[in-house]
Structures are given as structure tokens and as C-alpha cells.
Amino acid sequence: MTSIEMPDEQSVEEKRQGGIAWSGSLVGSKNPDNLGYRYSHAHKRFKKEESENEEDKFPTNLVVQFQNRQGDELGAVVDIPTKSTMEDLSALVQSLLEEEEKVPYSFYAKIQLDGLEEDVEITTDTLVEFLRQQSSLSTEQTLTLTYHPLSIFRVRPVTRCTDTLPGHTEAVLHVSFSPDGRLLASGGGDTTVRFWTVTTALPKQTCKGHRDHVLCTAWSPDGNYFVSADKRGIVMLWDPITGKLQGQPIRAHAPKWVTSIAWEPLHHSPQDCCERFATSSKDGSVRIWNARTHAKLATLQGHTDSVECVKWGGSGLIYTASRDRTIKVWTADGTHDLGKLVRTLVGHGHRINTLALSSDSVLRSGPFDNRGKIYKDLKNDTKEAARELYKEALGGEPERLVSGSDDFTLFLWNPSKSKHAIKRLTGHQQVVNHLAFSPDGGRYIASASFDKKIKIWNGKTGEFLYTLVGHVGAVYQVTWSPDSRFLVSASKDSTAKLWEISSQKKPKGAKETLPGHFDEVYALDWSPHGAAVATGSKDRTIKIWKH
């Protein structure tokens, strides 16, 4: 009978602790990573093999073809390291373009998703990290990267209240800066419209004429008109310089109140100035008016309930959202085709409260650039200046539309091409009441909700990025800084908050809290040149915030 020698306790304990075992080589004997040595622990051997396989999976270099948003290729294909950062890629594009001004860029890779080719933004620090996330990408094929220019100027974050503007005797419901950023207009429950000089924070004009709450206001993109509408359905046009009423009040939708106003974009106007605007109402209709003659040009009918929002796009289309749960797309070209129904967008399960266009920011400012001056000094042709800015902002891409509803969801649309949604965006737990695309061509979408939260989404794909938490009351409104780096939110909790937005990481909390109002903050706007933020409150005051 063969006897089996049992190991002593000391040898068993040594095996449990593991160690470094010799594998036949004496070279570099003091270096455990030397190939002649191996780890005796199985889990350590596994980790080492796994890391080696992970590195072997991705080559050190990758062949890339750069192209702009129009699809025009930039030079020949280039062989770049996979460890390249986004700053490295930006520097390479800048050198290929031979730019004097160092414009930063974001990059999008073309990826097959569900059989369709999509542009996915690279939000990782390096290219190899993005490749690890996208299993469908092949490193043996040329990777097409689309570069998007970002804002060359940087807006400083607003941190303090510089001025408090008293004057309104009821809640301030609307504040908005003029397209050139020199004037501020406000309207509210005291039935007046007021104009303020931004540089001095002093009242310029007080306009009286309405007999009920001023519910909505809008500047013409060239800054020549300011239109206001009240709860009785009366529309008035004002000269912002003199404060005088232009013509007689228009009984646009009386006795039903007006819910929204939208001006025709300057670059799309038949004239060399802005003359046409649209109003939506509780009566279920949308009407188009001539600001100079006060004539009604068309009535858009088809909704079966109140129309909550109207948007006039830059591609010749008008978009209307209603309580009947539909969005309708109408033509806005010429006179004979004005107001013809193109398509109906269906998807929401409850009434639609708000719309936002990816071109909202550039359409609002018309011919004015971020300095408040006429773009490229085209003072004799402001229409051409507005057209150039619009083309530059969209980069050949179609306008995108996002809608928010009482069903707690958002829908992202490509309304000029399809009646089907790009994506349904879910996550809010209460009513979605305001939306805003970032000014950099709609890279991000910010959504405000009664659930006290703001959500940030990818503006091209609808992918959820992160939630901004900090308010303790319903969030009423959001507005972006002109360089798309910051977002300000207004809330029922009597504060506004400043958030720093990045695709790389979620902010830990609000960068700044802007206190000072004594009641709910209803109204909010960031000046087009980025110098100031205005907030309007139920406490009947307006506050100006600067760096």
C-alpha cells in the first residue's frame, strides 16, 4: 500500500500566499514583469492576460478621414495615434485648415446603428476610449470624423446681481434682450410693456395700452419691432426706440388669449426687413400678420384644441403644437403657398406645451453677431448678413425640432424630412414645460420640468447625458449662454442657478446660485453677446446678473 506524504502546515500557507515562480529565465530576475517570471496566483495571471489582450485588441495607430458638416473631405486620409486626445485632433484640423484663429472643434464618428448610419459625438478623453465603447467600429477601416466648430469666444459665468429694476406693479412674466443686446424688454401682470437700457439699467420707455395681463412678447430679428399680446387676444406693435404704438391694436384672437408669438426669420423675409409674424391662441388657430399694414395674411386651421406654441423655422416652415397632442408643419413660402399643411407629427400621449428649434438662437439674433454688431459689416444688406449667420450656425444640417408634453416625455424630430420621430426621450417624472437647444447648432438640449430637475440630452441623437439636481421647486425656464458652456435655470424656489455644461462629465452641482428674488422666478434671458442675464419674478422686480 502506497503511503501518501501529507504536506506540512508551513508549505500549505506559502502556497496560499502565492508568490513569483521561476519560468526558466534569469534575465531581469528582480523585475516581476519580466517574461521569465509568472504570477503563481491564478487571478493575477488572468488579470495580466486580460490587460495584454485588451491592448492587443486596439492598434497604436488608426487611419482617419476628416470632413466638415457638409460632407466635404479635408485633405487626404491621415494616420494618427489611437491615444490622441480631442485637443490633438483639433490642433490637427486647425493645421490642415491653416487657420489663423485657433477655433476649437468637437468630433463625430459615423457609426452603423440599427442598420442606419448615425453621427455619434466623441465625448471621451482619447480616441482609443471611444473605440472601446463602440464595438461596431472596425480599426482596419478608415474612420470618418466630422468636425464641428465650437464658439471661439468664451462667456464669463454670471455670479452677482449688479442691478435691480423696480417699476412693474404685478408679476413680471417676460424678459427678453433685443437682438443686438442693447435693450431689455419686459411685460407682466400690470398690463404694461417696459423697455430698459442695458448699459445703465435705467427705464427707457413705459408702454401702456393693454387692458389685461401681457402673456407673450417677441422682438423682430432686425430689432425694429417689439410685439406684445394679452389675455384678451389683443396684439400691439411698439417702436422700441420711441416706445410709441405702431398703428392701432390688432384684435388678433379676441376674446381668446394669445399663447405664443413667432417672427419670420430675417433671411427668409420677402422684404429686406422683418414684416411678418405668427400668433397662436386658445381658439385653436394660428394667424399670420403683416407688421407694417396690420393685415391678416393667412389663418392656419386644423388643430382641434388650443395651440400652445408656434415656431417659425429658417427653412421655410412653420411649426405649431397643440393640446390635441399633435404638431403640425406648415409652409411659409410666398403668398399663395403660405399656410399649407405639409405633415402632422404624432406621438405624444398628452397635450404639448413647448417646442424648440436647433436654430432658435441664430434666428433670434438676425444679422447681429456675438459682439452685437452687423455680421461682416454688411450694414447695407442685413438680410444677407442674417443668411450667412444662419448657414454658418447650421452647417448644412436640417433644422431639428424637440417637443415637450404633459405626458412627461420629449420627442426629437427632423420635421422637414419625416413625420416619424428620431427618438422618444423619457426620464422626467412630471410635466415638461420648457426646452432649449444650445446655440452651437443644437449640440445639446436642456429640458425643464415641474419635477424640479433639468435634463441634458444629446441634441443630434436624443441620447440622455445627465440630470442637473439642485432646485427645490418646479423649474420654469432655462436659457443658454451664447458659447453653450453655461446654462441658467429659473425656478419656483425663488432662485436662478448657473450650471457648467460639458459632454465629458456631469457637473457635481450648480456652479452658482443666484439668490435675491423674494418670490417665484418666472422669466429668464441671456443677452446675445453674453454679458448679462436678466430674471423676472413674481416679486415684481427684474434683476441683472453679470460676472
Image (tube, rainbow, N blue to C red):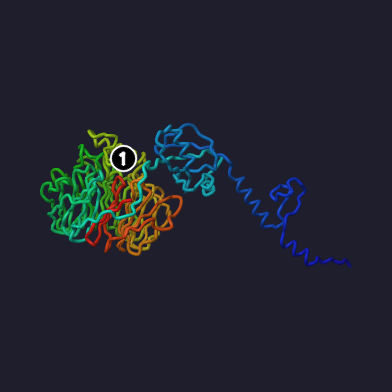
Residue 497 seen? yes
| Spot occupied by residue 174 in the image (x, y as percentages of width and height) | 23, 55
In the picture, measured across the screen, residue 27 lies left or right of residue 437, that is right
Seen at 15% across and 46% down, the residue is 239
Q: Which residue is mark 1?
A: 390
In the picture, measured across the screen, residue 421 lies left or right of residue 77, that is left
Q: Nearer the viewer, residue 331 or 195?
A: 195
Q: Secondary structure at mark 1?
A: helix
Residue 286 seen? no
Q: Nearer the viewer, residue 333 or 312?
A: 312
Q: Nearer the viewer, residue 61 or 22?
A: 22
Toward the right, the furthest residue is 1
Quadrant holding the N terminus? bottom right
* Residue density around tag 1, few if under 14, some if 14–19, many if 20 or more, within 10 Å: many
| Spot occupied by residue 192 in the image (x, y as percentages of width and height) | 16, 55
Toward the left, the furthest residue is 248
| Spot occupied by residue 369 in the image (x, y as percentages of width and height) | 29, 40
- Count the labels in the image: 1
| Spot occupied by residue 116 in the image (x, y as percentages of width and height) | 45, 45
Kind of residue at disc 1:
Tyr
Seen at 54% across and 36% down, the residue is 79
